């Protein structure tokens, strides 16, 4: 693996410039109306090394909501709250091969649990496992955990995006009520959905997610302070899901072209990492038909090929 920092710094502007035009071929997500306001042509990347220093390029000042990227960390919190046995009685461990919001398989398999924790149905089931006395308490615990691992007490919920999703989430509501009928969700369905919508709406920058990724790249321990934030076993589980399902049904293609654990969100964010070296945050709001950032994926392909990052 070629990791010369100066060569990387020199190459980044070129890679961003090469990748930005790919945005023209995609669309900004509009099924959550508030997300459609994002600038389509934007592209930014932040790479945080083990001393906590960021190398950045492009539109890294842009804020965006985590959306599905949050699912990696609610999975981790649910594992820390409940352990593996409880979590994997509610969600499976396999890629679904379907769209992220698909209902298809919930009625086709026995037991009728979501295929994995990174599709919407699985992440809603995970939201129901977060410990707390009330939905507000659960949401606060998630926000506090995310602030800790992002190393920023400034990150917060974007209430405009939260309200926009809550008002338009007919498909997620139908998934959640289906899960209730299958016995996967217990308790009040709207309360579980509220926890889910809120964590999807947590607003970040590329450097926030680069730092969250760096913790995963370092097996759950902050390389600067030496503090263990996440048990290594749960990081291992999260990274495995990122490789097999993190880019939804484009995960195989991403594994071949980039070869790193990654998680995308419909706001155009991608959290990825070079294990043991870098946490990486990318934003590029224009998406392909699978819901992944077009320019962002292209940028990661260029970097991975140039610096021989693939794990495989
Ligand atoms: O539930 C939803 O549809 C969104 N809050 C999150 C979906 C998402 O980010 C899928 N990612 N590519």
Image (spheres, rainbow, N blue to C red):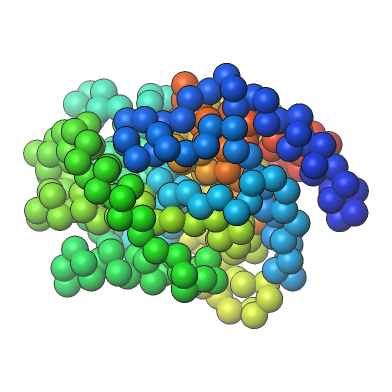
Picture quadrant where residue 219 is located:
bottom right
- Residue at figure coordinates x 56%, y 66% from the top left: 220
Left or right side of 176 for 274: right
Of 114 and 192, nearer the camera is 192
Left or right side of 147 for 210: right
Of 88 and 103, nearer the camera is 103
Picture quadrant where residue 294 is located:
top right
Return the x and y of residue 254 as percentages of the image width and height: 61, 31
Left or right side of 115 for 108: left
- Residue at figure coordinates x 19%, y 63% from the top left: 135
- Residue at figure coordinates x 46%, y 30% from the top left: 28
Of 223 and 150, nearer the camera is 150
The quadrant the C terminus occupies is: top right
* Residue 177 against residue 107 in the figure, above or below: below
Picture quadrant where residue 306 is located:
top right
- Residue at figure coordinates x 32%, y 36% from the top left: 32
Return the x and y of residue 62 as percentages of the image width and height: 56, 50
Return the x and y of residue 257 as percentages of the image width and height: 68, 29
Left or right side of 124 for 213: right
Q: Is residue 262 visible?
A: no
């Amino acid at each position: 693996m070629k990791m010369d920092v100066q060569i990387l710094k020199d190459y980044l502007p070129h890679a961003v410039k090469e990748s930005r035009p790919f945005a023209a071929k995609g669309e900004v997500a509009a099924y959550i109306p508030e997300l459609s306001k994002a600038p389509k042509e934007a592209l930014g990347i932040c790479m945080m090394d083990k001393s906590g220093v960021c190398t950045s390029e492009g539109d890294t000042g842009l804020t965006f909501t985590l959306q599905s990227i949050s699912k990696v960390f609610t999975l981790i919190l649910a594992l820390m709250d409940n352990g593996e046995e409880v979590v994997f009685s509610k969600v499976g461990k396999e890629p679904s091969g379907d769209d992220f919001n698909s209902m298809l398989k919930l009625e086709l398999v026995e037991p009728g649990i979501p295929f994995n924790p990174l599709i919407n149905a699985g992440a809603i089931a995970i939201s129901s496992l977060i410990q707390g006395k009330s939905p507000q308490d659960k949401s606060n615990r998630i926000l506090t955990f995310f602030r800790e691992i992002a190393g920023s007490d400034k990150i917060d919920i974007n209430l405009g995006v939260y309200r926009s999703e809550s008002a338009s989430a007919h498909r997620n509501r139908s998934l959640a009520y289906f899960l209730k009928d299958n016995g996967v969700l217990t308790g009040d369905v709207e309360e579980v959905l509220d926890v889910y919508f809120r964590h999807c709406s947590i607003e970040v920058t590329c450097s926030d997610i680069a730092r969250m990724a760096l913790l995963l790249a370092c097996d759950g321990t902050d390389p600067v302070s030496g503090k263990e934030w996440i048990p290594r076993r749960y990081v291992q589980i999260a990274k495995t899901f990122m490789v097999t399902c993190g880019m939804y049904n484009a995960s195989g293609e991403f594994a071949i072209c980039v070869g790193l654990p990654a998680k995308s969100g419909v706001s155009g964010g991608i959290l990825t990492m070079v294990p043991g070296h870098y946490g990486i945050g990318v934003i590029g709001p224009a998406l392909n038909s699978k819901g992944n950032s077009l320019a962002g994926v292209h940028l990661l392909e260029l970097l991975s090929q140039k610096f021989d990052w693939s794990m495989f």
